[in-house]
Amino acid sequence: MAAVLLQSEPTETFADRRFRFHPRAALLAGLILLGALIVFALLAPLFGSPYRVFADGLNAQGLPLGLGAPGHLLGTDEIGRDMLARLASAGRIDLEMTFIADITSMGLGIVVGLVAGFYRGLVEQVLMRITDVFLSVPTIVSGLALASVVGEGLTGIVVVVTALYWAWTARVIYGEVLRLRSRVFVEAAVAAGVPRMTILRRHIVPHLSSLMLVLSALNAASVVSIGAGLSYLGAGVQLPRPEWGNMLEEGENALGYAPHLVVEPLVMIILTVLAFMLISEGLTNRGPTAREKTWLDK
Amino acid sequence: MTDIPAPFDWDEFVAAATENQIDATAASRRAERLAFAGRVGLRIVLAAVTILAVLILTFILEFVVPGNPARAVAGPKASPVVIAEVTRNLHLDRPVWQQLLSYIGNALHGNLGYSYVSDQSVASLVGGRLPATALLMAGGIAVELIVGGALGIWDGLRPRRSWVLASLNIGLLSVPTFTFGFALLLLFGYVWPVLPVTGGFGAEQLILPAITLGLLGAPYYANVVRDQLRETLSAPFVRTALAKGLSRGAILRRHVFRIVVPPVLTMAGMDVALFLSGVVFVENVFAWPGIGELQVQAFDNVDRPVLMGTVVVAAAAVVVVNLLVDLLRLVVDPRVRSESL
């Protein structure tokens, strides 16, 4: 019976393989996409000033030029500024914000998670209860409240995003440290008299490195959407300095006659988030259990 | 004469043993019940502590960080006399800890202060907006469960993870909430104008925002439903049912879905926190009169009491719903009871 069951294990056919989602391909696609976005943002000065108002920037009816207009590949906005220049210049600030806020929020979360997981007792209880508090406040609602206090601009957004997002990382890292610290190699190190800090540095942190990479890619994806989202709601980077979120706010009223003012920043935001999502998807190791054959499969 | 031991009475022995057994079972049940009550009590206390911590945080943001709140109330051009009066009215001349205590005391009595802009109480402002937000979230969760459940079941009944779901998942997860709202608004409001774009409170206005909220969460649910389904399908009782000759439909209905559905429903409860963030964007894109729109208005007016009051109400809602979900899980699923916190 067992032999029969073993033989009935699925064998991968060519058709299955063709449509499988390849982790490596996802990682590569994500990295290429992110690289392209960074290059686009770095080349911003080539596309001209984002503030320059072109005399031929509006058509005869005074409406913004659409896609593919001569001299303005991506059209112009409502007062005749070049959309390509604005998008690229906005990309700089968006990517800058993403990287800084990703590092700060991940850093805080990792430190809290490591400390809470490694030093048990009172420290752990206090830190994790604080983490729970931050996990239970709805992000955007409290983000706006916080933004009204810490102020506008890039620093404001970085502070808000860090305050709102560190707890998620802390929670995951904490759980993983708890799992790791009961492993045999930690026990062996303790028995051998290795100092606690050394155990943390040499045995715990290296095991967390791949998880940290996945988390920071996921975190970056949230940071992009929250940063742009807060700017859209009026917090964060302020006009006239272009940023994808506040470009949306600006173009919102023109949705009826110049949809490209909204669609273009939208596409940029989606591409950036997609790049980070693909990277995290490619870095995640999917367990083999998801591919086990079940009794109802023919 | 030595005592002759009483003949061994089998019936008596069984009776005594059974009684002991019953005693032991009763005692262990009592202990279990006590531990259960303790756990429930601890969860309630933790929830209360969380709300208290949120109150302290909002207090710090509202009264300590900005420097001089009286100036914020009176406006930038107010004379020193007016500022002194506002300071006295708001009790800002008292020590910080007294201010904090009265802030918390007021909040526990439902008084979250008064709007700087409209002189209405924060509680009535937020309370007036809550039904709209609750309706929107209910709509979103309904869409999410229906679409996510259907996708997850479809994918779960296939032997291999479908590339359709995998791509859909990563695709929809990459779309920020407000972005998707804009896309829907553009499609169904302007390109193919079948739904109103003016916003407001009504059934027709609810469709697009609910779809925006729900559709973005759907792939996540699809994944959870799929994983649960796969796990359950490989359980031995499914093999037994198959061997008994039950049809596939009957196996799914009678045995599988009963296990898959409860965890998915408890997850829906936990979504409240996520949705309370999402609604801010959705309400603003679609001009739906809920607490998200209120929050953005308050932000534009630098109306700190309303900003902080909304945070308190939203956080309290999340904490209470999470507590209810936790307790429900404790009651429904015996496996959770033995878990530590």
Image (cartoon, rainbow, N blue to C red):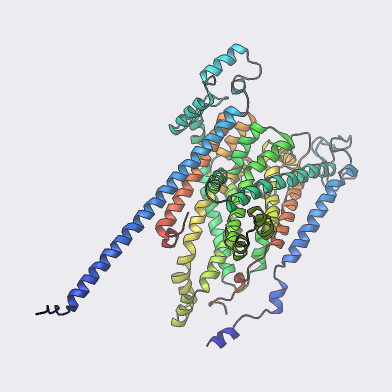
Which of the image's four quarters has the C terminus of chain A? bottom right
Give the residue at the far left of this rendering. Answer: B1
Residue A73 in view here: no
Against B292, is B5 above or below?
A: below
Residue A65 horizontal/vertical position (percent) = 83, 42
* Numbered disc total: 0
Instruction: Identify which residue is drawn at 51% across, 32% down.
Output: B125
Displayed quadrant of residue B171: bottom right
Displayed quadrant of residue B169: bottom right
Q: Nearer the viewer, residue A217 or A249?
A: A217
Residue A177 horizontal/vertical position (percent) = 60, 56
In the shown orientation, is residue B149 left or right of residue B18? right
Q: Nearer the viewer, residue A276 or B251?
A: A276
Give the residue at the far front of this rendering. Answer: B1
Residue B186 horizontal/vertical position (percent) = 69, 47
Against A267, is B243 above or below?
A: below
Instruction: Identify which residue is drawn at 47% across, 44% down.
Output: B47
Residue B153 in view here: yes
In the shown orientation, is residue A180 left or right of residue A228? left
In the shown orientation, is residue B282 left or right of residue B257? right
Q: Nearer the viewer, residue A285 or B179?
A: A285
Residue B173 horizontal/vertical position (percent) = 66, 55
